[in-house]
Image (cartoon, coloured by chain):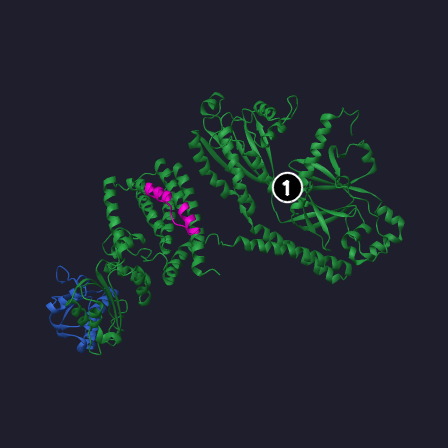
Chain colours: A blue, B green
């Protein structure tokens, strides 16, 4: 089973706590989670950290986690910090 | 006082030497079984471990040299190369060179030109096996020297700054974002490489989503000055750890950086390399595979450690040493060994020697006091001291196998030099002997082996004509025999040529032309100085300086060497050495007023020498021992010991101690009488006569090297733990005495040189047989 969620608007310190809960419960509910980031308008270090932590969590629990449709600001920040490769989307969207 | 680093370096040197020995051993074995994966793995492991350890201490030239060798060994491991004898010879040369380099480290020296040339030479030959043509090698060399120039110019990446950022956890809550600073940097320079540090990031469920956990290592290209860069971080300076390393920074600056940063040092090393702030040249020199792809692809290595020539991080060394230790612990689990300083062991044995004397003294006083409890305690003490002594002496014993194994290499090299096919056989490798003896016996043995190979083993055609196998055999053997260790060097060669020896001896005026000598006497002539019967002195031997030195070295170890040779069949050199040098079980005897000690191991039995027997000998010092003729020596005559008057029995003088009390209480069974017993004897003259007839002589029958002799003494005083003390130089010409010891009462007893005495008796006997008229009815 898989699930899709999205982050829209600010992926920053202002909703960091809420987003953490969102990621955690989503990971609890599914074995394969897709997070759509096409609507992210702004992202800061907290966002990057959440992405990294969520990915590790998923790996640890042996679940799939994919950040997809990165918006330009997200892609930018990942390029800046050389993390693009770590979040490279899969060639096909998971079913 | 040595620092921990010095100790670590000493350990490195000792262990590297061990590893080189193992490597050489394996190389010699692999020639016989070139496809054995275990032996090849052993060779690889030895090289690899030396390389890794050298890297920890920043001994770059060893690392880079070993690295090339390791690469070739890797190919052998992967069956891309076959271990033929050329390759073995090459690696043996590599082993030798590494030994030289390790010795250099021990002497804190630098490689000289000759060593550098050897290294270059060997590396070139190794590289051929790596499939690198000389042209490619030249290209690599040029590149390598380029890298070297870069690192000579400055160990950081050319023209790039290195910025290390670790922000405080609250920086985000303070309204500042690390990303902003990074973006700002991009406005006045280029971020060539950035490595995010995610080590501090906790689990998703544990983290504080508003806290900052990320750090960055950045290689930054800019023409701006340091102030500008620092200025970029002005607002966050108090809340962050910022390090800015200018271009051309020394490697030591990076090491300091590693030290100050919170992450694990080895990991930081990896990160800095990824960042590119440190050049390939340094990385190559610090045990790194030649690869520019991320290290994760190859899996975790032993840890890429950046070290400077002298400024090595203690923590880094510790971490990696721990790791090495784990590997070693695993290996050493089978035989839990401990490395002990040899001096400490000697000290230990000296102390035990003192303990023995003190214990003897206590026993003596206990006997005089006559208190039963005390006597028992003293006896128990004496027994325990004996056990401690034995145990301590075994600590110093090592197997001779290790020494024998070294000769594999010697035989191999020398047979190649002589162009003879000679094999080495070894037996008795587990025979143990004292450590100091082992160290000193190496040189004489080497000479004996070389001699056998050079002069003993005949050329192949001669061997064939004689019906012998074309390959010659040298056999090393060792075993214990009555308190000695015997080492034999045998060859199946042509044996000693008696005629040549005789001719040479006459030429050198060592013997007269008409002198008749036994075979063994002729053979022993080769030990005379300057003696050599070879027609042409070879590189190895034949210059006539060898055998006399060999005998001298062996004599210095209180040993003997004998020759057993038969023409056409072969020669055996038999070296006998005492098993222990320090403490022995002795047998105390008295002659006149003096005490002597006979090493108990050489004592066969004690018999009485009655007057009849003395007469039967007809003036010749012989004894009929159950049908066997036993020659003897009277120690009294030999050492010219004067008669002393036995003291009166009511002599209560304490100072006379053991010897006097024994004289008064003489008893052929060797029992030391209590004062009551002595008084009883004194009171009853008949009893005294029966037990103790005047001037009874006793013969201590001793044996050495298959010969027996009798030592005529007056009193037999029983077993005695003897701590051998060497006599001073003044006494070095003394025959028949090999040392002294202290009795419990402080008096001196001389230790008899039994081998010498036995030889003396045998020689005298021989002379007598040669020159005397045949007896008209000899001893029965």
Where residue B354 sits: x, y (%)? Answer: 65, 56
Q: Which residues are magenta?
A: B99-122
Left or right relative to B444: residue B386: right
In the picture, the quarter occupied by the C terminus of chain B is: top right
In this rendering, does residue B393 appear at all? yes
**In the rendered image, the vertical position of residue B566 relative to residue B434, given as above or below:** above
Residue B197 vs residue B498, the one in the foreground: B498
**In the rendered image, the vertical position of residue B633 relative to residue B211, given as above or below:** above
Where residue B644 sits: x, y (%)? Answer: 82, 47
Mark 1 belongs to which subunit? B
Residue at 89% x, 50% y is B685
Q: Is residue B254 magenta?
A: no
**In the rendered image, the vertical position of residue B419 relative to residue B210, given as above or below:** above
**In the rendered image, the vertical position of residue B318 relative to residue B604, given as above or below:** below
Q: Is residue B100 magenta?
A: yes
Left or right relative to B344: residue A75: left
The main secondary structure of the magenta stretch is helix
Residue B163 vs residue B573, the one in the foreground: B163
Q: Within 10 angstroms of label 1, few (less than 14), some, or many (20 or more) residues?
A: some
In this rendering, does residue A71 appear at all? no
- Residue located beneath label 1 in the image: B482
Q: Quadrant of residue B304?
A: bottom left
Where residue B322 sits: x, y (%)? Answer: 40, 59
| Mark 1: secondary structure | loop
Residue B364 vs residue B447, the one in the foreground: B447
Q: Quadrant of residue B762?
A: top right
């Amino acid at each position: 089973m898989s699930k899709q969620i999205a982050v829209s608007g600010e992926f920053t310190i202002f909703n960091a706590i809420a987003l953490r809960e969102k990621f955690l419960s989503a990971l609890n509910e599914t074995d394969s989670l897709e997070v759509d980031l096409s609507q992210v308008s702004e992202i800061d270090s907290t966002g990057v950290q959440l992405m990294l932590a969520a990915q590790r969590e998923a790996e640890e629990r042996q679940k799939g986690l994919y950040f997809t449709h990165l918006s330009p600001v997200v892609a930018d920040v990942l390029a800046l910090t050389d993390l693009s490769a770590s979040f490279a989307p899969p060639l096909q969207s998971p079913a | 006082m040595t620092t921990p680093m010095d100790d670590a370096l000493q350990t490195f040197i000792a262990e590297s030497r061990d590893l080189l020995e193992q490597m050489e051993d394996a190389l010699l074995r692999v020639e016989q079984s070139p496809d054995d994966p275990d032996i090849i793995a052993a060779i690889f492991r030895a090289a690899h471990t030396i390389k890794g350890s050298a890297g920890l201490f920043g001994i770059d030239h060893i690392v880079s040299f070993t690295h090339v060798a390791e690469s070739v060994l890797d190919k052998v491991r992967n069956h891309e190369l076959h271990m033929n004898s050329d390759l073995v010879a090459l690696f043996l040369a590599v082993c030798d060179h590494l030994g030289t380099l390790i010795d250099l480290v021990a002497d804190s020296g630098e490689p000289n030109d000759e060593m550098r040339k050897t290294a270059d030479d060997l590396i070139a030959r190794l590289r051929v096996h790596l499939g690198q043509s000389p042209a490619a090698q030249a290209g690599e060399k040029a590149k390598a020297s380029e890298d070297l120039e870069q690192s000579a110019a400055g160990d950081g990446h050319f023209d790039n700054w290195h910025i290390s950022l670790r922000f405080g956890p609250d920086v985000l809550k303070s309204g500042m974002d690390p990303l902003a600073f990074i973006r700002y940097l991009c406005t006045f320079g280029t971020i060539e490489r950035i490595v995010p540090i995610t080590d501090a990031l906790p689990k998703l469920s544990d983290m504080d989503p508003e806290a900052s956990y990320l750090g960055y290592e950045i290689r930054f290209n800019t023409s701006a000055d340091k102030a500008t860069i620092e200025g970029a971080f002005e607002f966050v300076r108090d809340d962050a750890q910022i390090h800015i390393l200018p271009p051309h920074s020394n490697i030591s600056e990076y090491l300091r950086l590693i030290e100050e940063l919170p992450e694990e040092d080895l990991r930081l090393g990896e990160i800095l390399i990824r960042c590119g702030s440190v050049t390939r040249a340094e990385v190559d020199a610090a045990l790194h595979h030649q690869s520019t792809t991320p290290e994760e692809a190859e899996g975790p290595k032993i840890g890429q450690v950046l070290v400077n020539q002298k400024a090595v991080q203690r923590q880094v060394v510790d971490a990696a040493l721990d790791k090495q230790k784990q590997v070693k612990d695993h290996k050493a689990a089978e035989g839990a060994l401990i490395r002990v300083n040899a001096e400490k062991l000697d000290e230990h044995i000296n102390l035990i020697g003192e303990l023995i004397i003190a214990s003897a003294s206590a026993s003596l006083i206990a006997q005089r006091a006559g208190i039963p409890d005390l006597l028992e305690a003293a006896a128990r003490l004496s027994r325990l001291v004996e056990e401690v002594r034995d145990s301590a002496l075994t600590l110093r014993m090592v197997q001779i196998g290790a020494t024998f194994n070294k000769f594999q290499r010697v035989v191999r090299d020398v047979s190649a030099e002589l162009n003879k096919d000679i094999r080495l056989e070894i037996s008795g490798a587990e025979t143990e002997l004292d450590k100091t003896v082992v160290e000193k016996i190496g040189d004489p043995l080497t000479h004996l082996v070389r001699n056998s190979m050079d002069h003993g083993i005949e050329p192949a055609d001669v061997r064939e004509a004689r019906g012998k196998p074309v390959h010659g055999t040298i056999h090393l053997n060792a075993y214990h025999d009555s308190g000695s260790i015997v080492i034999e060097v045998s060859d199946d060669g042509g044996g000693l040529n008696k005629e040549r020896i005789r001719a040479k001896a006459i030429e050198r005026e060592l013997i007269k032309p008409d002198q008749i000598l036994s075979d063994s006497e002729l053979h022993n002539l080769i030990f005379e100085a300057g003696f050599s019967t070879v027609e042409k002195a070879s590189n190895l031997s034949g210059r006539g300086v060898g055998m006399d030195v060999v005998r001298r070295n062996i004599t210095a170890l209180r040993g003997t060497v004998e020759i057993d040779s038969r023409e056409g069949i072969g020669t055996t050199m038999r070296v006998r050495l005492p098993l222990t040098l320090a403490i022995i079980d002795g047998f105390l005897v008295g002659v006149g007023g003096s005490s002597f000690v006979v090493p108990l191991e050489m004592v066969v039995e004690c018999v009485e020498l009655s007057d009849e027997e003395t007469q039967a000998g007809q003036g010749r010092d012989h004894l009929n021992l159950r049908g066997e003729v036993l020659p003897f020596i009277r120690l009294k005559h030999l050492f010219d010991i004067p008669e002393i008057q036995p003291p009166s029995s009511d002599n209560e003088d304490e100072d006379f101690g053991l010897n006097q009390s024994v004289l008064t209480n003489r008893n052929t069974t060797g029992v030391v009488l209590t004062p009551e017993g002595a008084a009883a004897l004194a009171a009853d003259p008949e009893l005294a006569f029966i037990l103790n007839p005047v001037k009874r002589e006793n013969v201590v029958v001793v044996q050495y090297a298959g010969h027996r002799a009798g030592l005529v003494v007056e009193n037999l005083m029983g077993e005695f733990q003897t701590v051998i003390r060497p006599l001073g130089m003044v006494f070095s010409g003394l025959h028949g005495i090999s040392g002294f010891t202290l009795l419990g009462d402080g008096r001196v007893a001389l230790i008899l040189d039994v081998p010498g005495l036995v030889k003396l008796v045998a020689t005298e006997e021989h002379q007598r047989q040669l020159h005397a008229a045949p007896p008209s009815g000899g001893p029965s």
